[in-house]
Image (spheres, helix red, strand yellow):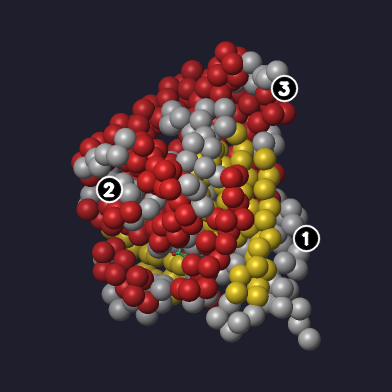
């Protein structure tokens, strides 16, 4: 007979081992990027050691009653990489491939993003290894609430602030907030809304947060286009992943006159050289769960997706998607990393060798954390900003970060925009370490 606490358990693999994806560990990739940036700014050895590991690694195993009455044990993670610049901050990912290695990489990227954009937060990331689409709404709610409870005081509105990421959404954040609020005293209950960001508008979310990451992707792309003299209006775009980030990016680019000519997601890929309507596709995916069957485009074999000609390629799904297996087929002038870690290091070298630009994840997808900061500020002061205000502040913040990357490329004579973005972030962290010192 099955042990009710391990039946259907996803806990077959030991934690902390890199997933068997055929690629090197994601944290190893993150570390190699960090080392390149650290070399550029001569980061002292002691700071390299400190920043090359997370401060805290929290793993929780918790049981949840499923609809059939049995219990399933889930494994959740919260990795707190750095709180030098402010409270730990980062999303919570729900996906079967979530593991310690992945969450460590994602947490470190949050530290660099906040530093690069001068957001007073540190870096963290969390996740649960399971497939949220395979659960009923009731089961999902119990998983989210039980995870929040298991994290306990490891998160807090001025300590560590989760947000949505792949597989989670505004509803997940509302459940997290409500669980946390109900675990605090009555006097604190209204004061803890900012325990999470990315909530629904009605429960304290910010205007513009849902589209913020996609909006930020477009702001960064516009900045690059102005710099190099690329015309976005009329440009063709290919998007991998049409969830929160990919769909918002597609809709906003379409409004700016670009044409989405190919889209891929977990279910397959579609193309139309005359343009796929990103608004209609968004509605379709919301209703049907994927791009499959969308009547306004042609269905293609997912293996052929990368070869569809497009000026701009936006990976907005998972890590390790642009690889040596498909890099030769990619014809884009620029790869815009809306997802975290979508390009493997060897594919990055291949793209650089042939002059394809890469706009790096820690810059390009930072719109989410920037507007999360705005949401946190609004909750703290019981205010509601309007959408224009949020968008303008987001644009100014990201363009300042883009300017800093352009300037440091020139100053340090560095070609890679990723290396330059790391250099900006690490230089800022070094200054703060130098002024604060290392306790005790
Ligand atoms: P989401 O869950 O809303 O959407 C994910 C999309 O990826 C879906 O369209 C899904 O079908 C697709 N996908 C999943 N597996 C795939 C596969 N094997 N091949 C092709 N497509 C696949 O997630 P999201 O919030 O849009 O996040 C997407 C990426 O952006 C992630 O890397 C995430 O870390 C990053 N990101 C998200 C935010 C945010 O605010 N949500 C902020 C910064 C970075």
- Disc nearer the start of the sequence (2/3): 3
Mark 3 residue crowding within 10 angstroms, few (<14) / some (14–19) / many (20+): few
Residue drawn 73% across the image and 73% down it: 6
Above or below — where is 208 with respect to 70?
above
- Disc nearer the start of the sequence (1/3): 1
**Dot 2 lies on which element?**
loop
Whether the residue carrying mark 3 lies under 8 Å from ligand 1 is answered with: no
Above or below — where is 74 with respect to 150?
below
The disc placed on residue 14 is 1
Where does the image place residue 194, in percent across and percent down from the top left? Answer: 41, 43
- Count up the numbered dots: 3
| Near-viewer residue (68 or 30) | 68
Above or below — where is 358 with respect to 280?
above
Mark 2 residue crowding within 10 angstroms, few (<14) / some (14–19) / many (20+): many
Residue drawn 52% across the image and 35% down it: 87
Residue drawn 52% across the image and 62% down it: 144
**Dot 1 lies on which element?**
loop
Mark 1 residue crowding within 10 angstroms, few (<14) / some (14–19) / many (20+): few
**Dot 3 lies on which element?**
helix
List the residue tagged with mark 2.
Answer: 207
């Amino acid at each position: 007979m099955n042990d009710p606490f391990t039946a259907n358990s996803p806990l077959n693999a030991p934690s902390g081992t890199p997933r068997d994806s055929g690629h090197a560990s994601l944290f190893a990739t993150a570390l190699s990027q960090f080392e390149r940036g650290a070399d550029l700014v001569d980061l002292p050895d002691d700071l390299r050691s400190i920043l090359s590991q997370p401060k805290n690694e929290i793993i929780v195993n918790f049981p949840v009653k499923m609809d059939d009455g049995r219990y399933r044990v889930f494994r959740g993670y919260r990795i707190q990489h750095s709180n030098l610049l402010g409270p730990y901050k980062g999303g919570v990912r729900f996906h079967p491939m979530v593991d310690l290695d992945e969450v460590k990489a994602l947490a470190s990227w949050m530290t660099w993003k906040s530093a690069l954009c001068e957001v007073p937060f540190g870096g963290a990331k969390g996740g649960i290894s399971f497939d949220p689409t395979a659960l009923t709404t009731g089961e999902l709610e119990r998983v989210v609430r039980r995870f929040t409870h298991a994290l306990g005081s490891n998160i807090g509105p001025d300590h560590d602030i989760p947000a949505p990421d792949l597989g989670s959404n505004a509803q997940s954040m509302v459940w997290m907030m409500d669980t946390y609020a109900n675990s605090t005293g009555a006097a604190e209950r209204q004061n803890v809304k900012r325990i999470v960001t990315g909530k629904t508008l009605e429960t304290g979310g910010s205007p513009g947060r849902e589209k913020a990451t996609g909006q930020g992707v477009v702001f960064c792309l516009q900045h690059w286009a102005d710099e190099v003299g690329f015309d976005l209006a009329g440009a063709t775009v290919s998007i991998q992943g049409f969830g929160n980030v990919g769909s918002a990016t597609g809709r906003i680019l379409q409004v700016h006159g670009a044409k989405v000519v190919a889209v891929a997601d977990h279910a397959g890929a579609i193309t139309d050289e005359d343009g796929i309507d990103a608004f209609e596709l968004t509605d379709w995916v919301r209703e049907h769960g994927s791009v499959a069957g969308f009547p306004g485009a042609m269905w293609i074999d997912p293996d052929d997706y990368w070869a569809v000609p497009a000026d701009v390629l936006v990976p907005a799904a998972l890590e390790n998607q642009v690889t040596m297996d498909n890099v030769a087929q990619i014809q884009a002038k620029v790869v815009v990393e809306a997802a975290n870690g979508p390009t493997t290091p060897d594919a990055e070298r291949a793209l650089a060798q042939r002059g394809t630009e890469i706009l790096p994840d820690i810059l390009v997808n930072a719109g989410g954390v920037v507007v999360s900061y705005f949401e946190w500020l609004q909750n703290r002061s019981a205010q509601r900003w309007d959408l224009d205000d949020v968008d303008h502040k987001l644009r100014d913040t990201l363009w300042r970060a883009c300017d800093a990357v352009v300037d440091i490329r020139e100053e340090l004579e560095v070609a890679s925009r990723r290396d330059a973005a790391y250099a900006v972030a690490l230089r800022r962290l070094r200054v703060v370490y130098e002024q604060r010192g290392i306790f005790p």
